[in-house]
Image (spheres, grey):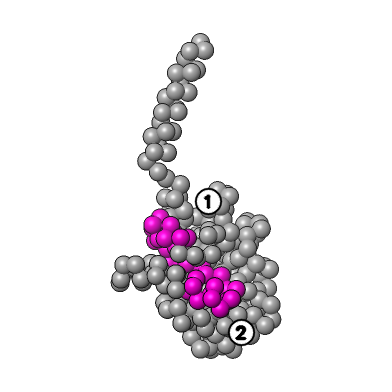
Amino acid sequence: MRIFVDTANFDDIKKAYDMGVLSGVTTNPSLIAKEAGVRYEDRLREIADYCKGIESISAEVFGETAEEMVKEGLAFSEIAPNITVKLPLTPDGLRACRQLTDKGITTNVTLVFSATQALLAGRAGATYVSPFIGRLEDVSKGSGIELISQIASIFEQHDIKTNILAASIRTVDHALEAALAGANVGTMPYKVIEDMTKHPKTAEGLATFAADAEKYKKNLK
Ligand code: E4P
């Protein structure tokens, strides 16, 4: 499972990228709204300039009709070659997905809560499909991960090339289970990426090594 960071906060994006683990960034209207006074296009440009070589930066459309979404998507795609246009799973969103895909623009169909929605996104040519596992797990434990497994099985049986992008990951366990269930990508806040570096035995081992390094230095004197 490749790692994307789910934020529009530039400091968090830099921390994830500088760690050397990052393959992409996902943003949405709620995330950019937290960055008071920042223009969406400017933030996307900053991310593209800083995060050299990443596969995808998702930029979500605000429009509701396919025409509006295509227009916004085309404008986003001018910002950088790795911009991915993020579209909602609605009939208009799917229409826009097909049109943008046919123009060679990468797409991410979002707000997916069922395997049949994911099947439609795959058939509309989406590059990524985003099942929201955290929001499902909030209402019924296990259902978010079960959804990833169902989509993975359908995509494999029917040879659908769309990447499964497990979204709304809130915990290390969500990341683990999504990876085991067959997600190609997981998008998560920086805090979850940082939590994934942690283990009590790592902390314990580090403390022992630090103490022994001091002993070693003393013995040399
Ligand atoms: C991803 O593309 C979504 O923007 C995001 O993961 C939603 O996460 P949330 O449910 O924590 O808002």
In three-dimensional space, the C-alpha distance between marks 2 and 1, rounded to whole angstroms, equals: 34 Å
In the displayed structure, does residue 49 sit left or right of residue 65? right
Q: Which residue is drawn at 46% across and 47% down?
A: 197
Q: Residue at x 45, y 28 (%)?
A: 209
Image spot of residue 43 (x, y percent): 57, 64
Image spot of residue 96 (x, y percent): 58, 85
Image spot of residue 123 (x, y percent): 57, 83
Identify the residue under disc 1.
15
Q: Residue furthest front?
A: 157
Mark earlier in primary sequence (2, 1): 1
Identify the residue under disc 2.
98
Q: Is residue 95 magenta?
A: no
Secondary structure of the residue carrying numbered label 2? helix
> Is the distance from the Cβ of mark 2 to the nearest ligand 1 atom less than 8 Å?
no
Evaluate whether residue 1 shows in this view. Answer: yes
Image spot of residue 35 (x, y percent): 48, 64
Residue type pointed to by label 2: Arg
The image quadrant of residue 103 is: bottom right
Residue type pointed to by label 1: Lys
Q: Which mark is residue 192?
A: none
Q: How crowded is mark 2: few (under 14 residues within 10 Å), some or many (20 or more)?
A: many
Secondary structure of the residue carrying numbered label 1? helix
Q: Nearer the viewer, mark 2 or mark 1?
A: 2
Q: Nearer the viewer, residue 140 or 43?
A: 140
* Disc 2 to disc 1: CB gap under 8 Å: no
In the displayed structure, does residue 26 sit left or right of residue 102? left
Q: Residues within 10 Å of mark 1 (few under 14, many from 20)?
A: some
The image quadrant of residue 99 is: bottom right
Q: Which of 60 and 184 is in front in this view?
A: 184
Q: Report the magenta residues as a range.
A: 151-180
